Amino acid sequence: MSSDTGTQRREAAFHDKWASSTSLEGVLVRESFEAPTAMENHFILSRMGTLADKRLLDIGAGLGESSVYFALHGAQVTAVDISPGMVETALRLAKSYGVELEGIVLEAENLNVASNCYDIVYVANTIHHVENRALLFEQIARALKPGGLFISYDPLAYNPLINVYRRMATAVRTKDESPLTVADVKLAKKYFCNVGHREFWVSTLLLFVKYYLKDRVHPNQD
């Protein structure tokens, strides 16, 4: 059953437009995980361990850089996004790298995927776009195999640099976004065991200093 809302329609339209304006040459796959500034992804990879032959669900896969990276390391990846344009771009990106993905257009809160199927569920910069986070967590818990790993990263409402960025970057974010709070972490504990979080505000500072103050790239330039 669809849970389509005005927020979801706006999110899909926004990200369709983003996908249509992006060339594959501009999608950084290895750099997104291996660059010195990608500290959050360094940590995530250390927690994931070996990816070979793992079934991995990438929710909010976007342009596909994460899905393709995981596939390059042997994972069997299902890339899910609310935006048809993003899913199409992710599949084209995978083809250009010589790997295969399963791409599905779905809302994060309405995951029409098999239960107890995935070793890893990865959600990057997506939860803050989701209205019904309890339903999202419920769906993720259902999709995971017993003992599976759910790992994500998102902006926190308490990060002053993120708040500065949000005020400046009006053209590259949607009006419905809502950064995570402690309440969201507590909510996750109702659905998952061994829940923890780690903050990477220093890496945020480094990126902001590099791109805005040094390279003179405004946040509205994606």
Image (spheres, helix red, strand yellow):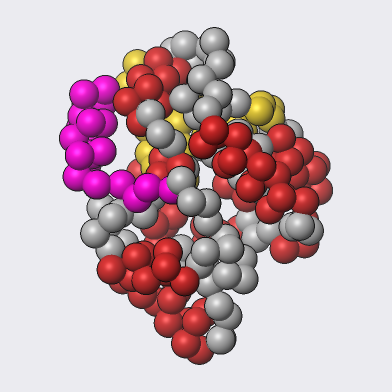
Q: Which residue is found at the position 36% from the left and 54% from the top?
A: 155
- At which x and y percent is residue 149? 37, 30
Q: Residue furthest bottom?
A: 214
Quadrant that contains the N terminus: top right
Nearest to the observer: residue 13 or residue 202: 13
Task: Please determine whether, in this image, residue 25 is positioned above or below residue 72.
Answer: below
Judge left or right: residue 187 versus residue 27: left
Quadrant that contains the C terminus: bottom right
What secondary structure predominates along the stretch shown in magenta? loop
Magenta stretch contains residue 1:
no
- At which x and y percent is residue 88? 76, 38
- At which x and y percent is residue 33? 52, 57
Magenta stretch contains residue 185:
yes
The magenta stretch is: 177-196
Q: Residue furthest front?
A: 6
Nearest to the observer: residue 100 or residue 139: 139
Answer whether residue 119 is visible to the viewer in this image. no
Q: Which residue is found at the position 55% from the left and 78% from the top?
A: 218
Nearest to the observer: residue 142 or residue 179: 179
Q: Which residue is found at the position 57% from the left and 60% from the top?
A: 172
